[in-house]
């Protein structure tokens, strides 16, 4: 009850009241011992000459003192951090060379300045078409880029720091947008602030701006200004020294004759964001990497999206990057025994999902498939596969269920029956591969058929998302096909839209009231955003992943459109036919729905994870035992 923030004092028992009474006393105290993820100590002798170490769960030796003690002892601490963006860029180049051997690839180290002048790339930034691109793909960042209409390197450097929490908390993000969009607003900056920060129109954006303002505005010396910066970032121990500098800041401003109100306002800005702002060099290097990834996405989008997926994605779930690849023109193929690898692969415009998406497929099975294929070529049939790959019936069934043998032209249900008939389930029989090909007996099996609807739900269970449009799984067709284009046309009007949940961010107002920002995919596969203010957020809540029917007013701020939600509820999906009760009425209804979906379903725009009831009941396909299953 207390954690939600929704309660009345009279609802609380004695223990709850005591928690509220004393909780403020522990504010700011350490909660537990934490580890600096990239903090590396470098010593002249082995570390145990200086400190005992402990082994936390991840197994990295950790000393028993903090960075301040290390500094006092003269031990060097370096922050060594890794991020997948660099691996993604490296892998993209390798994939491009494989898939387009004749393509000309720019030098990503020496040609960055050319990228910064490329109008195609700069248009991607100003239009926030940055999904998959380093640091600039999140909903908040894409919103900021749209509002700023950023279209150059300097603007992207500033945006990379403006997006940090401190600038927004100081109230200066909106002011920065105003001064960027409307030059006449820049005249409102204090002359000293404008002089020392001309690139950002007199607004503190970077961490070193704190030092500049403290030095030039309040006439603190540089050492005192740095104490101010470090103290506000939480990296300084002496509160007394910090308080002395704070007092000197206000005294100097009075002596200089600055307006007390303005002095306090600038101090509040410093205090609110100094601990979160980026150093300018940090933002500048991030923007360079953003431009490198933007270049790859603009000119080699399919290869770049494969590299993005193979490096674990980014801000979003893998299904959203699969969706983005489709929007860039790719044909998405489920895992195939003849074309797939452990990671995702690309052949022309076809992207084959890797075996790694099949959570229950063992690594040794993946390796055996690839080795057999490299040794003797592609598989010609299910029988050929069984003869060449050491595999259990459980593992083979996973591959058949995901349609990895579709090259045979035989339905999955028939293949499952053949697999059970041909492959003995006793594991001790197959200690080593066969020396000779076995003559397989022919079995007479009734012709069976997998519907597109069944295949979609099989993909959801095994991959985590379907390869068809998720809107094809709605129980009732949408009342309209409105997308982002129609949304913009309804500016300041009410609109009804359907959207698949991409991301939900819950935050609180200054008064502690809950509000939520949502990002969705429309029926055409485009992103759109929503906001739920406290009166609505207190009555409506999200109920997990899926498609929502959203009713609200289209609002606009700095050319960024969103829906102010008035009402919303989750849409129902068609029942999973694999787990339907086998009574005439149910089967007749599902057959009718399946036929409808089969006429519409294809390799659609969306690839989305749905929350489905997976209670196992009677089915009409052979089931196999599995070591672990989400549906058991």
Image (cartoon, rainbow, N blue to C red):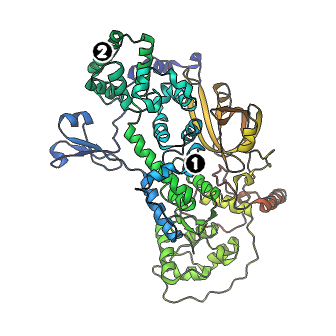
Picture layout, residue 174 above or below residue 448: above
Q: Is residue 338 visible?
A: yes
What label does residue 124 carry, if any? 1
Label 1: state its secondary structure. helix
- Within-10-Å neighbours for mark 2: few <14, some 14–19, many 20+: some
Q: Is residue 546 left or right of residue 66?
A: right
| Residue 595 in picture, x, y percent from top left | 81, 62
N-terminal of the pair, mark 1 or mark 2, is 1
Q: CA distance from mark 1 to mark 2?
A: 47 Å
Residue occupying the point 64% across, 33% down: 531
Q: Is residue 232 left or right of residue 436?
A: left
What label does residue 248 carry, if any? 2
- Within-10-Å neighbours for mark 1: few <14, some 14–19, many 20+: some
The C terminus: image quadrant: bottom right
Which residue is more in the foreground, 488 or 187? 187
| Residue 543 in picture, x, y percent from top left | 65, 40
The N terminus: image quadrant: top right
| Residue 299 in picture, x, y percent from top left | 55, 59
Residue occupying the point 27% across, 48% down: 61
Of the two numbered discs 1 and 2 in the rendering, the one whose residue sits closer to the viewer: 1
């Amino acid at each position: 009850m207390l954690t939600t923030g929704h309660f009345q004092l009279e609802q609380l028992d004695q223990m709850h009241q005591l928690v509220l009474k004393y909780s403020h006393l522990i504010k700011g105290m350490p909660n537990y011992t934490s580890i600096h993820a990239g903090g590396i100590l470098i010593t002249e002798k082995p570390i145990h000459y200086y400190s005992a170490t402990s082994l936390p769960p991840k197994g990295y030796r950790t000393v028993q003192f903090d960075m301040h003690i290390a500094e006092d002892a003269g031990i060097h601490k370096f922050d060594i951090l890794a991020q997948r963006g660099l691996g993604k860029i490296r892998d993209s180049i390798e994939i491009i060379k494989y898939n387009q051997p004749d393509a000309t690839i720019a030098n990503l180290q020496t040609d960055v300045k050319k990228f910064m002048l490329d109008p195609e790339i700069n248009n991607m930034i100003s239009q926030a078409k940055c999904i998959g691109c380093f640091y600039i793909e999140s909903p908040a960042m894409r919103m900021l880029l749209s509002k700023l209409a950023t279209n150059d390197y300097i603007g992207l450097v500033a945006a990379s720091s403006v997006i940090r929490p401190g600038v927004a908390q100081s109230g200066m993000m909106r002011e920065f947008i105003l001064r960027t969009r409307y030059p006449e607003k820049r005249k409102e900056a204090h002359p000293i602030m404008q002089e020392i920060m001309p690139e950002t129109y007199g607004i503190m954006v970077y961490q070193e701006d704190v030092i500049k303002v403290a030095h030039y505005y309040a006439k603190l010396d540089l050492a005192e200004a740095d104490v101010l910066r470090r103290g506000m970032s939480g990296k300084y121990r002496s509160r007394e020294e910090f308080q002395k500098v704070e007092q000197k800041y206000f005294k100097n401003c009075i002596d200089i004759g600055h307006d007390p109100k303005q002095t306090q306002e600038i101090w509040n800005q410093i205090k609110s964001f100094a601990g979160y702002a980026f150093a300018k060099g940090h933002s500048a290097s991030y923007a360079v990497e953003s431009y490198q990834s933007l270049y790859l996405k603009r000119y080699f989008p399919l290869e770049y999206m494969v590299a993005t997926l193979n490096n674990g994605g980014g801000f979003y779930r893998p299904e959203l990057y699969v969706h983005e690849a489709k929007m860039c023109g790719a044909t998405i193929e489920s895992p195939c025994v003849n074309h797939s690898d452990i990671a995702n692969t690309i052949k022309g415009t076809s992207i084959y999902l890797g075996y790694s998406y099949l959570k229950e497929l063992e690594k040794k099975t993946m390796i055996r498939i690839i080795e057999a294929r490299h040794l003797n070529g592609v598989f010609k049939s299910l029988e050929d596969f069984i003869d060449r790959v050491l595999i259990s019936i459980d593992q083979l069934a996973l591959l058949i269920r995901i349609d990895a043998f579709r090259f045979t032209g035989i339905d999955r249900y028939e293949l499952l029956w053949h697999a059970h008939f041909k492959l003995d389930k006793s594991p001790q029989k197959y200690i080593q591969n066969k020396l000779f090909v076995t003559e397989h007996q022919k079995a007479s099996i009734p012709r069976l058929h997998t519907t597109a609807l069944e295949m979609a739900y099989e993909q959801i269970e095994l991959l985590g998302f379907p390869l068809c449009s998720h809107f094809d799984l709605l129980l009732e067709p949408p009342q309209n096909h409105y997308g982002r284009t129609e949304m913009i046309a309804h500016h300041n009007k009410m609109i009804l839209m359907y959207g698949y949940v991409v991301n939900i961010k819950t935050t609180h107002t200054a008064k502690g009231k809950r509000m939520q920002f949502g990002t969705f995919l429309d029926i055409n596969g485009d992103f759109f955003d929503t906001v739920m203010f406290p009166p609505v957020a207190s009555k409506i809540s999200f109920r997990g992943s899926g498609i929502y029917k959203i009713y609200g007013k289209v609002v606009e701020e700095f050319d960024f459109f969103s829906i102010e939600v008035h009402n919303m509820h989750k849409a129902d999906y068609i029942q999973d036919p694999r787990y339907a009760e086998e009574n005439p009425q149910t089967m007749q209804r599902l057959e009718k729905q399946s036929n409808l979906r089969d006429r519409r379903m294809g390799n659609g725009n969306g690839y989305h994870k749905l929350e489905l009831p997976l209670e196992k009941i009677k089915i009409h396909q052979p089931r196999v035992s599995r070591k672990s299953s989400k549906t058991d």
